[in-house]
Amino acid sequence: MALKLSPLTFQHQKIPSFALPPASNLRSPRVFMASTLSSSSNQLLCYVLFSVWFTHSNGILRVLSFQFRLLNLREVENIKRPFSPPREVHVQVTHSMPPQKIEIFKSMEGWAEKNILVHLKPVEKCWQPQDFLPDPASEGFFEQVKELRERSMEIPDEYFVVLVGDMITEEALPTYQTMLNTLDGVRDETGASPTSWAVWTRAWTAEENRHGDLLNKYLYLSGRVDMRQIEKSIQYLIGSGMDPRTENSPYLGFIYTSFQERATFISHGNTARHAKDYGDLKLAQICGTIAADEKRHETAYTKITEKLFEIDPDGTVLAFADMMRKKISMPAHLMYDGRDDNLFEHFSAIAQRLGVYTAKDYADILEFLVGRWNVEKLTGLSGEGRKAQDYVCGLAPRIRRLDERAQGRAKQAPTIPFSWIFDREVKL
C-alpha cells in the first residue's frame, strides 16, 4: 500500500475511501494524493486526488475539487519496470566461498576431463529434434502433421499445461548457462576457454538446447496451444533470470544442479508415461529421450559433488545443508505470461496433481542424494558439520510428514484459465 489514511464517514462497497488529515492542522490550500497498487492482475488501481480549503470562520472543511479514477492494472502496466521479475527475488549474496577454495577446483581440472567430460556425447552421435518430427522435405509431410495433430487431440488440456511449462523451462537455457558462469573457479572466463569446466558448461548447454527445440516444435505442430502466449512466457522468463541463491559458490551450484537434473529426469519421465497412457507413443518417445539426457547429466553433476565430499567433506556438507535450508527453487520459478503473477505456482499445482513432479519427488531426490553421497557415513566433521549432517539426513522424512498434513488440509482446488491453452480452464 502506498499510503494509509483513516476512513471517511462515507463509503461505497466497491470504492475504498481515504480521509484527510485533521482539520486543525490545515492552514492553507493543500493537495493530497493516495494510491494503492496491488500485484494481483485482477484487482484495481485506485487513484485519488483531493484539493481542499479550510475556512477559518466556521471550521467547515470544503472539498473544492475531487478526482477519482479506477484503472484496471493492465492499463497501467507501464508503471512496473518492464524487465523486472513478477515477484521480488531474495537478498542477493555474492562470492560467499572463501577465495582459497578456488584452488580446489583448479586442481580438479584434470580429474574433470577424465571423469566428467566422458558424460558428453559427440555431436555426430547425438539425436536431433528432427529425428522425432515430421520431415518438411518429404512428400508426406502434411499427412505426418495431420497424424500428429490427431494423436494430440486425445490428450487433455491439463497435460498440455504441464508439457508447456516443462518446455518453457527448457527454453530458458541462456539463463542456466549464465548461472553456471557465475560460479567462482569454474566459469568460462573468455567464452571459449579450454578448461574442463568451461568445455563442460558449453557442451552441456549445447546438448540441453535440443530439449526445448524439440518440445517447442511438437507443441507448435499440435495446434493445441497458443504459441504467441508461450513465446511471450519464454521471453519473460529469460528476461527475469533465476534466483537459485548459489552465491557464486560451485559447492552450492553443483549441489543445486545435481538436484535439478534429477528433478527434470523425473518430470520428463512422468510426462512420457502419461503420453503413453494417452496413446501418443511418439510423444512418449520424445519425453523419454529427453529424460535419458537429464539422467546422464545428473550422473555428471552428482560425481562432481561426490568428489567434493571426498576432498572437503566439512565444507560440502555445510553447503548441502545451506541449499536445503534455503529450499531448492525450480529454474522457472520466475515464470510469467504477462497476465498471471502466480503462473509458476499454478503450473506446479497441476504437475503435483497429475503426479508429474510432486513434493514426494522432492523428498525422494533429497533422500537419493544423501545416499548417493554417503552423507550419513561422513566422519571427522566439525561441530557445525555434524549439525549439517544431522539436518540433511533427517529432512526427507520431515518433508513427507509436512506434505501428508498439507494434503489432509487441502481444500477443493479452484479452476482457472491458462493463457497457454487459449484461456481454457483447468483445475489446479
Image (cartoon, grey):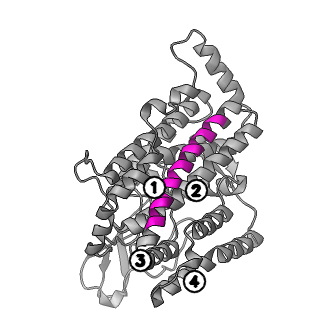
Residue in the image at 71% along x and 43% along y: 273
Residue 238 magenta: no
Which mark identifies residue 315? 3
**Is residue 250 visible to the viewer in this orientation of the structure?**
yes
Q: Main secondary structure of the magenta part?
A: helix
Kind of element beneath mark 3: helix
Which label sits on residue 73? 1
Quadrant showing the C terminus: bottom right
Q: Which residue is mark 2?
A: 263
**Which residue is tagged 4?**
390
- Considering only order in the chain, which callout, 1 or 4, is on the residue closer to the N terminus? 1
- CB atoms of marks 1 and 3 within 8 Å: no
Residue 89 showing in the rendered view: no
- Which one is in front in this view, the residue at disc 4 or the one at disc 1? 4
On-image quarter of the N terminus: bottom left
- Comes first in the chain, label 2 or label 1: 1
Q: Position of residue 396 (x, y in %)?
A: 64, 73
Front label number (2 vs 1): 2
CA gap, disc 3 to disc 2?
Answer: 24 Å
Give the answer, above or below, for where 284 lies relative to 319.
Answer: above
Residue 191 % position (x, y): 25, 46
Q: CA distance from mark 4 to mark 1?
A: 48 Å
Q: CA distance from mark 2 to mark 1?
A: 36 Å
| Three-letter code for the amino acid on which mark 2 is drawn | Ala
How many C-alpha atoms fall within 10 Å of the one at disc 4: few (<14), some, or many (≥20)? some
Secondary structure state at the residue bearing disc 1: helix
Q: Are marks 2 and 4 in contact (CB under 8 Å)?
A: no
Q: Can you say whether 122 is above or below 310 in the image?
A: above
Q: Answer above or below: position of 222 versus 388.
A: above
- Highlighted range, magenta: 285-307
